[in-house]
Image: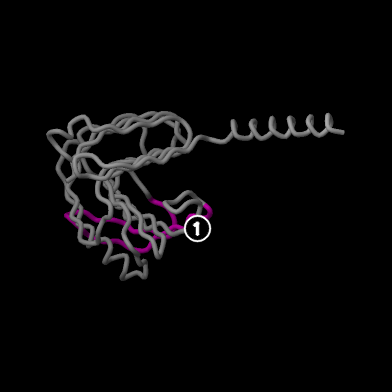
């Protein structure tokens, strides 16, 4: 009997280890650099973030990614704020990516938000449009069900403003209050601010890189 139990236990462990090997690796990393907050999350594949020019431009960061199910990361503030005016310059952007956005989270309610400056975050229900900083953004709302969040797996709303027309090498400004006030007028309310960063995202399982500076 003891031998049979031992064999069953060994088989159970082998099955558990095989299941773990098939589960994509997820990593969430955060920290501070030259007075700014940074965050990097990736699922599967590999990704890294560094700060090669931060000694000269404190908000500088560089990211590389390869074969990720999803990767999102960048540099900014923690906590963010409703009144934040974000300046940025995307110095280089190569390979595959989905978007470069002012990106962040709030709690109470739990909301993931994007103000897309490059690429596209179009998803969900179209809610209208808003003009800000010389550009027209289309607004969408989408519910994420049982997905990764800053509080673990959860169901939450995504608020998405999509422009996507910025140029590499150009200085740009995002007046966050214009977007947040617009969302509030649509009943899309934010809660207590968590981090707020300029973030690159890719979920195409490709390879890419960005070097950008935020201020």
Residue 140 or residue 156, whichever sits in front: 156
Whether residue 203 is visible here, answered yes or no, is: no
Magenta region, mostly helix, strand or loop?
strand
Residue 169 or residue 40, whichever sits in front: 40
Confirm whether the magenta stretch covers residue 124. Answer: yes
Estimate the x, y position of residue 192 in percent, counting from the top left: 33, 63
Estimate the x, y position of residue 16 in percent, counting from the top left: 66, 35
Residue 176 or residue 54, whichever sits in front: 54
Count of numbered circles on the image: 1
Query: Against 3, is 99 above or below?
Result: below
Q: Quadrant of the N terminus?
A: top right
Q: Residue shown at 36%/70% (left/top)?
A: 187
Q: Which residues are magenta?
A: 122-146
Secondary structure beneath disc 1? Answer: strand
Confirm whether the magenta stretch covers residue 190. Answer: no
Q: Residue shown at 26%/60% (left/top)?
A: 179
Query: Against 35, is 177 above or below?
Result: below
Task: Work out which residue is located at the far left of the displayed protein and give it.
Answer: 56
Task: Work out which residue is located at the far right of the displayed protein and give it.
Answer: 1
Q: Residues within 10 Å of mark 1 (few under 14, many from 20)?
A: some
Q: Is residue 148 left or right of residue 34?
A: right
Q: Residue shown at 48%/51% (left/top)?
A: 152
Q: How is the image coloured?
A: one colour
Whether residue 50 is visible here, answered yes or no, is: yes
Estimate the x, y position of residue 15 in percent, counting from the top left: 69, 33
- Identify the residue position indicated by label 1 in the image: 155
Q: Is residue 144 left or right of residue 182?
A: right
């Amino acid at each position: 009997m003891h031998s049979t139990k031992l064999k069953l236990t060994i088989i159970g462990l082998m099955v558990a280890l095989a299941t773990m090997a098939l589960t994509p690796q997820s990593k969430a990393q955060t920290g501070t650099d030259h007075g700014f907050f940074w965050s990097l999350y990736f699922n599967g594949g590999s990704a890294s973030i560094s700060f090669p020019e931060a000694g000269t431009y404190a908000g500088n960061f560089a990211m590389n990614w390869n074969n990720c199910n999803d990767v999102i990361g960048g540099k900014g503030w923690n906590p963010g704020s409703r009144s934040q005016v974000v300046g940025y310059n995307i110095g280089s952007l190569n390979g595959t990516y989905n978007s470069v956005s002012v990106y962040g989270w709030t709690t109470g309610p739990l909301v993931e938000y994007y103000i897309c400056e490059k690429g596209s975050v179009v998803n969900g229900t179209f809610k209208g449009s808003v003009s800000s900083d010389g550009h027209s953004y289309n607004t969408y709302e989408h519910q994420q069900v049982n997905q990764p969040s800053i509080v673990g797996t959860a169901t939450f709303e995504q608020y998405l403003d999509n422009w996507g027309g910025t140029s590499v090498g150009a200085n740009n400004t995002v007046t966050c209050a214009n977007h947040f006030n617009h969302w509030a007028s649509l009943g899309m309310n934010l809660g207590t601010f968590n981090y707020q960063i300029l973030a690159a995202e890719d979920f195409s399982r490709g390879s890419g890189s960005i070097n950008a500076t935020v201020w």
